[in-house]
Amino acid sequence: MPNATIVDAIRARLEDDPHISQPIAIAVAERNGTVTLKGTITGFRQRHAAVEIAKRTAGVHSVEDELKVDPRYRYTDDSIRGVALQALMNDEAVPADRIDVHVSNGWLTLHGSVDHQRQSDAAFAEVSAVPGVGGITNEIKVITAGLDG
């Protein structure tokens, strides 16, 4: 796929994605199958969505994510933590009583232990949708009892 076609395809998909509130704020460049995304966006979920769109575009071999989360849109750490805890408690796939959330300067860290990887993945997915999150560290440990237990 030619350079302009790849960039146009990514731009069109950014425009159509409901997770990206200001697609015009994302600059897209392509060279030899490597796409570079630059700009300032309002949250982690938008960043993730933009990178995934670029990765899934035909002709793209790699993505350089140079997107930044604008601190002017940052929520207070306490409000981010509250919304994240509520999101975990609302998801039946997440054992919320075994997971805690810490937030520092918009960076969210998940702590705790679960029985299955899918529970850790579900917790990560839930908090990635929280407004104001600039990044996530998942420190949830998956503790399994062996094959018979």
Image (cartoon, helix red, strand yellow):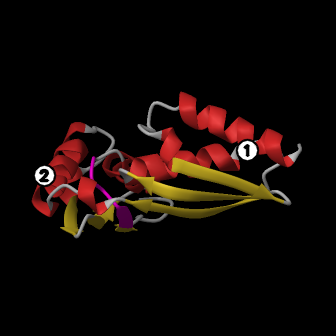
Q: Position of residue 38 (x, y in %)?
A: 56, 59
Question: Could you tell me which quadrant the C terminus lies in?
Answer: bottom left
Q: Is residue 19 left or right of residue 93?
A: right
Relative to 42, residue 114 above or below = below
Q: Residue furthest right?
A: 1
Q: Is residue 11 visible?
A: yes
What label sits on residue 76 in the rendered view? none
Relative to 63, residue 139 above or below = below
Q: Position of residue 115 (x, y in %)?
A: 37, 58
Residue at the image point whose x is 76% and y is 55% from the top: 30
Q: Which residue is mark 1?
A: 7
Question: Could you tell me which quadrant the N terminus lies in?
Answer: top right
Q: Nearer the viewer, residue 72 or 140?
A: 72
Q: Is residue 46 left or right of residue 9?
A: left
Relative to 142, residue 50 above or below = above
Q: Which residues are magenta?
A: 131-137
Q: Nearer the viewer, residue 21 or 91?
A: 21
Q: Secondary structure at mark 1?
A: helix
Q: Nearer the viewer, residue 125 or 53?
A: 53
- Magenta stretch contains residue 53: no
Looking at the image, tell me whether mark 2 or mark 1 is earlier in sequence order: 1
Q: Is residue 112 visible?
A: no
Q: Secondary structure at mark 2?
A: helix
For label 2, count other residues whose C-alpha is less than 10 Å away and answer few (under 14), some (14-19) or many (20+): few
Q: Is residue 11 left or right of residue 115?
A: right
Q: Is label 2 or label 1 in front?
A: 1
For label 1, count other residues whose C-alpha is less than 10 Å away and answer few (under 14), some (14-19) or many (20+): many
Residue at the image point whose x is 22% and y is 37% from the top: 90
Q: Which residue is mark 2?
A: 82
Question: Amino acid type of disc 1?
Answer: Val
- Spatial separation of the CA atoms under disc 2 and disc 1: 38 Å
